[in-house]
Amino acid sequence: MCGITGYIGYREAYPIIINGLKRLEYRGYDSAGVMLYDGKEIQLSKTKGKVSDLEEITNKEPERKKGNIGIGHTRWATHGVPNNVNSHPHISKSGNLVIVHNGIIENYDTLRKELISRGYTFKSDTDSEVLINLIEEVKTQENCKLGQAVQLALNNVIGAYSITVFDKTKPNELVVARLGSPIAIGVGENNKEFFIASDASPFIEYTKDAIYLEDEELAIIKIDKGIKVRKIKDDSMVDTHIQKLKLSLDQIEKGGYDHFMLKEIHEQPKAIIDTYRGRMLPNEGIIRMSGIDNHINKFLNAERIIIVACGTSWHAGLVGEYLIEDKARIPVEVEYASEFRYRNPIITSKDVVIAISQSGETADTLAAIKLAKSKGAFVFGICNVVGSSIARETHAGAYTHAGPEIGVASTKAFTTQITVLALISLKLASKKGEISKSELRTFMQEMQLIPKKIESLLKVDNKVKEIAAVYKEATNCLYLGRGFNFPVALEGALKLKEISYIHAEGYPAAEMKHGPIALIDENMPIFVIATRKGHYEKVVSNIQEIKSRSGKIIAIVTEGDTQVKEIADHVIEIPETVEALTPLLTTIPFQLLSYHIAVMLDKNVDQPRNLAKSVTVE
Ligand code: G6P
C-alpha cells in the first residue's frame, strides 16, 4: 500500500520520480505528491487523484520540477480521507524536514497529543505528519543529525513503515528506513546517484544494482559517500549486500496490450511453463522442488497442512486443499490469514503451514507466518516476488516465477500458484506412495499440455466479449462450481466485483439451494462450471434448478458437451483435461469476462477504486 520513490544524484529528479510513481501506482492511487529541492527552495506539489493529476499541476509551473534531489508518493489512504492536504509528502513545522511514508503508525494519536502539548500544529489527519514532526522534535531536543533523529524517533513508534526523509539543512542526503513495508535502494555507478523505491521497477532502466533494506534497518544515503546501513534498535552497523536485479523493462510495460490485466491473462501459458520448468521430469517420474526435498520429513510427518493467504491467493489455497488431500492424503485446512492470526489457533510443531502470496508483502499473511513460527510449525512460502518479506520470513518455499503482476486484479498469480500447489501435491503423493510412477507421469504430461490448452482457450475471447455485452448491466451475479472448481467460482465472482463493481457471489453449486436460489429471477446471470469431469450430473441438476426459476445460465463446459448446451443460454467450451487441473482452464473465461465487462463499463481495469495490489497494512 502506498508507493514511495526518491532520487538523489546528478540527473533531474522529477522525471525519475514521476515515472517511478506511475510504475508504483498499483500500490495505491488515491492521491500523489512530489517534493523537489532545487538547491534553494523545497517545491512541494501534491493532489488528490492519480499521478497524471499531479503532472497536470506541475506542468503548469515548471519550476516545481527542478532539482537533483526529490521524493515522491502515491497513496492508498489509511489515516485521513484522500484529499490534497492528506497527500504526501508531509512537511515538518519548521518547513525543513519532508517525509514520504508507507505503512501505519499505530500510536500516532498518543504521539500527536504529545507534540500538540509541545506547540506543534497539524494540517492533515495523517499519522505521517505526526512522524515527521516527531523526527523534528527529536532532532531539536537532541541537537543531532537527521539519521540519528530518525532512528530515535522510530524507536518510539509502534506500527509499520517504510519512509524516506529529506532535510533542507543537509540537502545532500536522504534517510530511508523500513519496518514491515518494503523498500529498495538502487545504487548508481560510483555512488554518484541513488534511487529509492517501494520496489525496483522505478529504477530498472538506470541500474541493476539494488539493496533491499531488511526490517528495522535505516540507511543514510549521501552523494559520493554512498550508503551506510544500521539497525534502528541497537545502532549496530549492517553489511550491505548489493543484489543484481533480473527484472527487465519489457516485463513491466504493457507490451501492446490496452491493460496490464489483459497482458497478464495472455501471459499465463508462458507463466505456467516458467513455473513448472525444471521441476517436472515426466520421463523419470520425478518432481524436483528443493524447498520440499530439503525438508521432506517435515511434510511426511505433518499431521496436517494449514494454508494461510488472502484474496485470490486464498482461493488458490482452496484449490491446494483439494489437490493435496486428493493426491497426497494429508489433511489440509485453509485459513484467511487475517482470521488465523487473531483467533488463537491451535498450531504445533507437527503442523506445516503453507503461506501463499503473490506480492510476498501482505501484512496479515506475514503476521500469520510469524505466529505459526512462534508455535514451532514449519512454514513454507509460495510467492511470486523474489526476495519479498514472506519469501524471507518462511523456512523454505517455491517461487511461482510468473513475472511481475501489475494489474490489481490477480490473474497469472492465481494459475501459477495452483501450478505450484499441484506440483507439491504430486511430490508429496509420490513420496508417500499414494501415486504410482505411471499415474505421476500421466499427470505431468497433462500439466505440460495446459499452456497450449490455455492458448487455444484464449481464442474464445470474442465469444466472451459477446456474453459480456449481454450481461454488463447486471447488478447481481452468481458463480457456481463444485469440487476443484468451487474455488474458481469464488475467484470468478471476486474478479467481477474487483474491476466492474458488480455484486457477485461465488458458491458451491449445491449450496445454492440454501439461500442464493432466493435471488434468482429472469434478470440474474448465473455462471456455472459444468465440466465433464467433476460431478457433472450433479451440476446439470443444479442448472435445471436455475432454469426452472428463469435464471440466465452461462455455462463453462468441456468441448463436445451436448447436454448443458441444450439448457444453458450461453456456453463456453474448454479443452478436456484431468479433473484436478481444470481450474487452470475454467478460470480463464471468467478472467476475460470480468475484463471485458469492466472495459465496456469504462472502469479503470488496472487500478480499480479502493483496492491496492499489495496490502501491507492489516
Ligand atoms: C490484494 C490484491 C489481491 C490479492 C490479495 C492478496 O487484495 O488486490 O489481488 O489477491 O491482496 O495479495 P498477495 O500478494 O498476498 O497474494
Image (cartoon, rainbow, N blue to C red):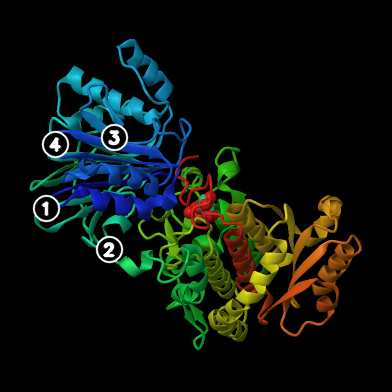
Dot placed on the residue nearer the N-terminal end, 3 or 4: 3
- Spatial CA span between label 3 and label 1: 23 Å
Give the labeled residue for mark 3.
99
Dot placed on the residue nearer the N-terminal end, 2 or 1: 1
Give the labeled residue for mark 1.
191
Q: Percent position (x, y) of residue 17?
A: 27, 49
- Spatial CA span between label 2 and label 3: 27 Å
Residue 590 appears left or right of 39:
right
In front: mark 1 or mark 4?
4
Whether residue 102 is visible, yes or no, is no
Dot placed on the residue nearer the N-terminal end, 2 or 4: 4
Disc 1 residue crowd, few under 14, some 14–19, many 20+, Cα 10 Å: some
Q: Three-letter amino acid code at disc 3?
A: Ile
Residue 214 appears left or right of 109:
left
In the rendered image of this protein, does residue 435 appear above or below residue 471? Answer: below
Q: Three-letter amino acid code at disc 4?
A: Pro
Residue 190 appears left or right of 577:
left
In front: mark 2 or mark 3?
3
